[in-house]
Amino acid sequence: EDLISDLDDVETPMADRLDGAHYRDDILRLLFICCHPDLPPTQQIAVALRIVSGLSVKQIACAFLVGESAMEQRITRAKARIARADVPFETPGPVERSERLGAVAAMVYLLFNEGYSAGGAEIAARGTLCEEAIRLARLLLRLFQAEPEIMGLTALLLLQHARAAARFDPAGEVILLEDQDRALWSARDIAEGLALIDKAMRHRRPGPYQVQAAIAALHARAARFEDTDWAQIDHLYATLEIMTPSTVITLNRAVAVSKVQGPQAALDMIEPLANRLGGYFHFFGAKGALLLKLGRSDEAREAFNQAIALASTPAQANHIRMHLDRLQQEGVRQPRL
């Protein structure tokens, strides 16, 4: 398969590209159909992920950081709205396709994240979601060749997926980024991803996917973990916070802040997020690691116990248990974020 980065920014009539090729893929066409403007954006994405991509209600709820029952109600309301309003789910024309591109990109992104979060015995089964998301992103880019955010999305997925072979040990346990064997990272995926994000930036129309891809590119370009440009990553996350304010983005930024300013600065950053991320595994995992770095072992243990209770995969739970075991057996041991 040709690398997407080899595509030229040749402007051809969008209608000819899309209609003549029938979207090149039925799944992609269905995603565009689901993004009907009569549905609120979150309902569009939830219905598409449930009906088209086949994700469970629980998986979709995790992606939206809401409870399973709340997501079930959201999907039910969307279906009822479709039936009540007799929403015409016909294949959209070229103008509608452009208007719906952002929602379709969000679906592809969430589909990838669901596969990326797999661990242990789920890796093989759910890892195919990552490959399907990359395939759909490539199709989107072939259809919208001059759209830098789609370049950024595709680059982001490729750069993240490049680390797949190094993220878990043979038993399915998590290997932290700093401990990964970078020789196992996919050089092909990295090369394609880097070329795409460089190309996207030349358009000078930045967006959230491009910024996230730029962060992933900094990790990919570091020959060793020690070479990571954490200051630049912190800056990019700050930019992302302005573009799309999110508690999860702030939590991710805190990891970079801990490397640049120390664990106390990072802890101060995430403490205000407690109410909104009280049901989020990664919040308590990060909080526990920061507290442990500060020598506050009792508070760290409490945070780790909360993280285990919220773990969605065995790999997540086992990773936290390693910290708890070390606390019990060796005293306070400095964890790594």
Image (cartoon, rainbow, N blue to C red):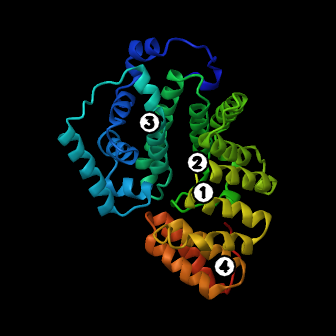
Question: Nearer the viewer's eye, disc 2 or disc 1?
Answer: 1
Q: What residue type is labelled 1?
A: Ile
From the image, tell me which residue sits under label 2. 165
Picture quadrant where residue 296 is located? bottom right
Q: Position of residue 20 (x, y in %)?
A: 40, 12
Q: Where is residue 293 in the image (x, y as percent from the top left)?
A: 71, 77
Circle 1 is placed at which residue position? Answer: 249
Q: Nearer the viewer, residue 75 or 299?
A: 75
Q: In which quarter of the image is the C terminus?
A: bottom right
**N-terminal label among 2 and 3:** 3
In this rendering, the label closer to the viewer, 2 or 4: 4
- What is the C-alpha distance between the residues marked 4 and 3? 39 Å
Cα separation, mark 4 vs mark 1, equals: 20 Å
Amino acid type at circle 3 is Val
Q: Are marks 2 and 4 in contact (CB under 8 Å)?
A: no
Q: How far apart are marks 2 and 4 (CA)?
A: 30 Å
Label 2 or label 4, whichever comes before in sequence order: 2
* Label 2 environment density (alpha carbons within 10 Å; few <14, some 14–19, many ≥20): some
Q: Mark 3 points at which residue?
A: 104
Instruction: Answer left or right for 75 relative to 186.
Output: left
Of circles 4 and 1, the one toward us is 1
Comparing 150 with 247, the one in front is 247
Q: Distance between the residues labelled 3 and 1?
A: 21 Å
Q: What element carries label 3?
A: helix
Image point (33%, 57%), residue name: 71
Q: Which amino acid does label 2 sit on?
A: Ala
Mark 4 residue type? Leu
Residue position for label 4: 291
Q: Which of marks 3 and 1 is nearer the N terminus?
A: 3
Which residue: 64% across, 20% down?
Answer: 6
Left or right placement of residue 107 versus residue 261 in this view: left
Task: Look at the numbered disc 4 and give the secondary structure of its residue.
Answer: helix
